[in-house]
Image (cartoon, helix red, strand yellow):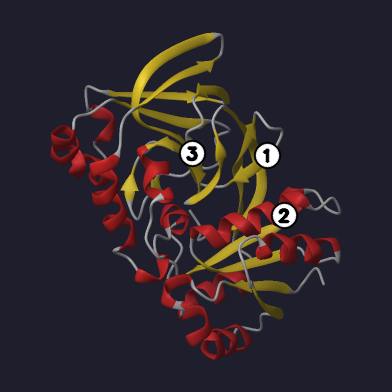
Amino acid sequence: MENRWLVVANPISGQGRAMHHRHEIEAVLQRHGVAFDFVISEHPGHAIELVARAVEGGCRQILAVGGDGTVHECANGIFRQQAAPTAEVTLGVMPIGTGNDWARGLRMPKNYAEVAALMAGGTQRLHDVGLAEFGDGTTRHFINVAGLGFDAHVVESLPDRTLGPLAYLVGLVKGLLSYDAVSLGLTFAGRRVDARAFVLFFAIGRYCGSGMNVAPKAEADDGLFDITLIQDLSRWEVVKSLRRLFDGTLLTHPKVLALREVAAQVDAGPVPVEADGELIGHAPVRFSILPRALRVLAPPD
């Protein structure tokens, strides 16, 4: 089992690409000598159960066939199980989702054969993982970016995700018309910042929201969150600043505060919190980093 991969396919990712291309994906893996079991997640949260059960049964290599949401569930499945240290379990992705932001940060190829070659070649590295702890006692792990404010508002109001790559843009435009800034307190290392926030990001990777570069200096294995606080912006300021969200110059904006911390508490009203593009709870919430807590499939540096 340790040498076999559990391949977890999300049937709705990328407008159903996982199922349309299933035979092609399986053939490519077989050509590269990859031993695997192919399973399909049938409902939200199912991939968590599938992965946890597989690791408890001896599997140590997981491939998510889908987007950031599929990766998110697979990562939480690894952290739910108790049979193996998480750093001894490898998580990879065949990126066929809408955003693929985690894969973008790792420079994972979209070509099936190139992913299969990485799986066969054993190119891996250790990766930080975030932990979100909520006031009601629930917890959730995440592997890329968590956010409160406008980002979570957009995720909450997203249309049917089977619309494809334009889904987030549609949600962004609609969300901008109905969004009000969030009053919050951010406490870290004995210091507190109170702000009216347009959005607050806790980033391990650099990208979210289908390519927005919200943490251009983030490194996925440095044991720190890159925290990006964008203070209250008018709708016109948002429109003027949109290019900064994508071209890596966001941190130069006068209303952006950038921090690097291992943990922080966010106190706010019951506003939604998203992580890896999935709604995971509501504030208040405490974020902490688990350094190099997971092994991931990635191209060589």
- Which residue occupies 42% across, 76% down? 15
Q: Which residue is mark 1?
A: 139
Q: Tell us which disc is closer to us: 1 or 2.
A: 1
- How far apart are labels 1 and 2 at the CA level? 14 Å
Q: Amino acid at mark 1?
A: Thr
- Which residue occupies 72% across, 63% down? 51
**Label 3 packing within 10 angstroms: few (<14), some (14-19), many (20+):** many
Q: Quadrant of the N terminus?
A: bottom right
The quarter holding residue 284 reads top right
Q: Amino acid at mark 2?
A: Ile
In the image, residue 297 above or below residue 25? above
Q: Tell us which disc is closer to us: 1 or 3.
A: 3
Residue 78's mark? 2
Q: Position of residue 256 (x, y in %)?
A: 29, 25
Q: Amino acid at mark 3?
A: Pro
Q: Is residue 2 visible?
A: yes
Precedes in sequence: disc 1 or disc 2: 2
Q: Tell us which disc is closer to us: 3 or 2.
A: 3
Q: Is residue 14 left or right of residue 225?
A: left
Residue 272's mark? 3
Q: Is residue 150 left or right of residue 35?
A: left
Q: Classify mark 2: helix, strand or loop.
A: helix
**Label 2 packing within 10 angstroms: few (<14), some (14-19), many (20+):** many
Q: Position of residue 176 (x, y in %)?
A: 25, 43
Q: Is residue 204 visible?
A: no
Q: Position of residue 19 (x, y in %)?
A: 53, 83
- How far apart are labels 1 and 3 at the CA level? 14 Å
Q: Is residue 30 left or right of residue 156?
A: right
In the image, residue 97 above or below residue 24? above
Tell which of 130 and 138 is nearer to you.
138
Q: Position of residue 238 (x, y in %)?
A: 20, 37
Precedes in sequence: disc 1 or disc 3: 1
